[in-house]
Image: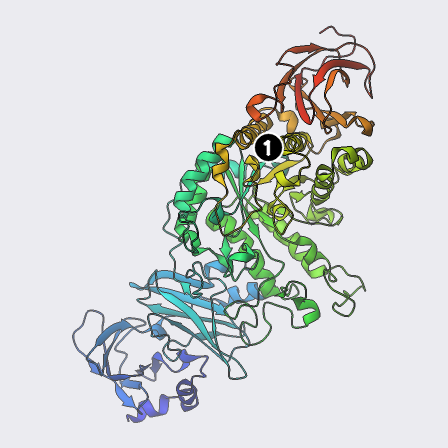
Amino acid sequence: MNSKLHNWINWILYDELLDGKINAPKHLLGIHDYGDGQVITCYKPHSSSVSVKSPSGKTLYPLEKIGENGFYGIYFPSKKFKGTKYRLVTEYYDGTTVTSADCYAFDGLFTDYDAYLFAEGKNYDIYNKMGAHPMEIDGVKGTYFAVWAPDARRVSVVGDFNMWDGALHPMQIHSVSGVYEIFIPDVLPGAVYKFQILTRYGEILYKADPYGNQCQMRPDNANIVADTESYKWKDEAWIAERKKMSRTDRIKKPMAIYECHLGSWKKAIEDSDFGFYNYRELAVMLRKYLLDMGYTHIELIGIAEYPFDGSWGYQVTNYFAPTSRYGTPQDFMYFVDYMHEKGISVILDWVPAHFPRDAHGLGRFDGMPLYEHSDPRKGEHPDWGTYIFDYSRNEVVNFLTSNALFWVEKFHIDGLRVDAVASMLYLDYGKQDGQWVANKNGGKENLEAIALLQNVNTIMEERNPGAYLIAEESTAWPGVTAPASMNGLGFLFKWNMGWMNDFLEYMKLDPYFRKDNHNKLTFSMSYAYAENYVLVISHDEVVHLKCSMLNKMPGYEIDKFANLRTAYGFMYGHPGKKLLFMGQEFAQLREWSEARSLDWYLLDQPFHKGMQDFVKELNHLYTKYDSLYCNDNESIGFEWTKCDDPNSGIVSFVRRGSSKKDQLLFICNFVPVERKGYKIGVPCVTKYTEILNSDEEKYGGLGRTNHGKKIQAVAEPCDRMQNSITLDIAPLTVIVLKYDYEEPGKKA
């Protein structure tokens, strides 16, 4: 062996390399200046020889074989090569020759400043460094990999490009950050990979990339190198307009949300675990449907990659990867772009509350608790069998914050609905005594999770004006939608779970007993302005033996449909944005299942088609009249005109918009009793025109309407009002009347 080469080699690192324990391979491998000369070393197991040459040269300089394990080296007395400007020519015993750039000749891309911000929890663009990023460096195409694994002894990239051999591409650890990185030449989009991790206890783990952008189709669970940069977006005008919208602007806009699980909205092949439509195919079908039905937003559940279909996407293993069930990341970009083209906003469900224990996932990622808290009383959900994120660790907070930003900035998502917020806020959520630890003040509030939510909302608003977060929060936590600057959580909207529970309990009752539960119908208005609410009838209400919406309703078939039309009418009249889960717009009979398509064949039946037409009319009515949305959070926008007579089963209220014109009066009859010539209090003496009646025959009713006629009010007190009208009200019916407000004493 050349004495210069022998003296340069760090034989401790050499032993670590051969033992598969090296975490700083660039200190041994690659190109290094040595005095006036250079040393080049490489590790090529199973090879017969290695030579080095310049990219365009023909002269080969054979490397000296050191031992029998595939380690080679050469000493040049002068500096013959610069940086990455050389190629390794490797010959194998089977006669194969491979020429490639040397991955250990390339400088790292993870900077000290990156590490500083990451440790502070403020490297919000970390998704541009972590993960797998195809790129070209010094004319060499390949992929840059980076992963955080501070407790690992060694991390390697393994994949279909290196026979899944962890000895071939050990990664370089960056200083004290715990981040490992490597640029591997000739690894291009489509390559399959994982991280092989040697733990401090000698165990070998094969982990999916926490920041990876694409995964294999389950049950396979490796990552795929993905190109997320070359898609040509066409929604520049949409994004520019979105940025102009203030928090107040957004609150005053209509939101008719269609909650959708793509895999079961429609399947290409029924009774198949793989019979899904592609994102692009779904975009075309769904956009046409949404526009026809009058929806303004689509909320997608189950997009971030997850292994088990039955979790619906709420047990995520790959937070930065749209699920491969429906295609590639670029296919999903097309889906969002296509929706934006016709003015449909896209909301994603986001799950920062917990993650599953799958062996390839985040749990015990580097052999130790990393993303989860090390104390099981803080790091595990006993009821759910999942891990809880360690919100006290800055790098974990950075992971979650950057993930929220990633979906908005990389995929142009308009909003994130945050799942299970209550489980984040309370340390004792779902736990018994002895299963949780109080905070530093002795309370049960999770102070670190609160800080995370406040920060995510604040940073989102600063970096992406017009984008927003919605909280699924099931308790009475104060200030969920108050700005973080005012000690609120900073969300723009909150799901109104209280209204949903009370209202559905009321609607499930036989009408005879509704009079004894009238408060369930009216109580929500006592807190309607406490938060910015979304009224929701979500997927959670039509699964696990809870029945479909139609089968929650009492009575014979005709009564069920009449009840449901009235329920939807009341919902659309009540203050708050609207969300309805797919299938309930046409009165799906069965509970929802992720394994099959919705029962679209039901639309061949008049009652179901009538229900679909009714919801369609509600959506178009909702977006046409701003009295139904612009003053959702102002007391001027709503007033009961009749709510104090439980025995009648009738309630009525007015909705007021931005002007005195086109105000609306809702009359809801929740009992199967027809009211002929019924007197109802109204706010002013003017003409009232019936613009919707759920008993119309086209919706499945019997046609007992007021036929769109103008009804003149008179100055005769009734209920809470000084004026009244008289009209016919069919059983189990909702009626909407339009009027222009007239000042008292002014003639109509």
Q: Is the residue 2 above or below the residue 724 in the image?
A: below
Q: Colour mode? A: rainbow
Q: Is the residue 524 above or below the residue 661 in the image?
A: below
- Asked whether 516 or 342 is in front, the reply is 516
The N terminus lies in quadrant: bottom left
**x, y percentage for residue 681?**
78, 18
- Asked whether 399 or 261 is in front, the reply is 261
Secondary element at tag 1 = loop
Q: From the viewer's perspective, is 106 left or right of 345?
A: left
Q: From the viewer's perspective, is 3 left or right of 652?
A: left
| Residue 655 seen in the current view | no
Which of the 4 image quadrants contains residue 70? bottom left
| Residue 16 seen in the current view | yes
Q: Is the residue 163 above or below the residue 135 in the image?
A: below
In this figure, which residue is indicated by the disc labeled 1? 254
**x, y percentage for residue 631?**
68, 29
Query: From this viewpoint, which residue is outermost toward the front?
Result: 556
**x, y percentage for residue 63?**
25, 85
Query: From this viewpoint, which residue is outermost toward the top?
Result: 747
Crowding at dot 1, Cα within 10 Å, few <14 / some 14-19 / many 20+, comes out as: many
Q: Amino acid at mark 1?
A: Pro
Q: Is the residue 188 above or below the residue 238 in the image?
A: below
- Asked whether 195 or 22 is in front, the reply is 195
How many numbered dots are placed on residues in this image? 1
- Asked whether 199 or 179 is in front, the reply is 199
**x, y percentage for residue 193?**
40, 68
The C terminus lies in quadrant: top right
Which of the 4 image quadrants contains residue 136? bottom left
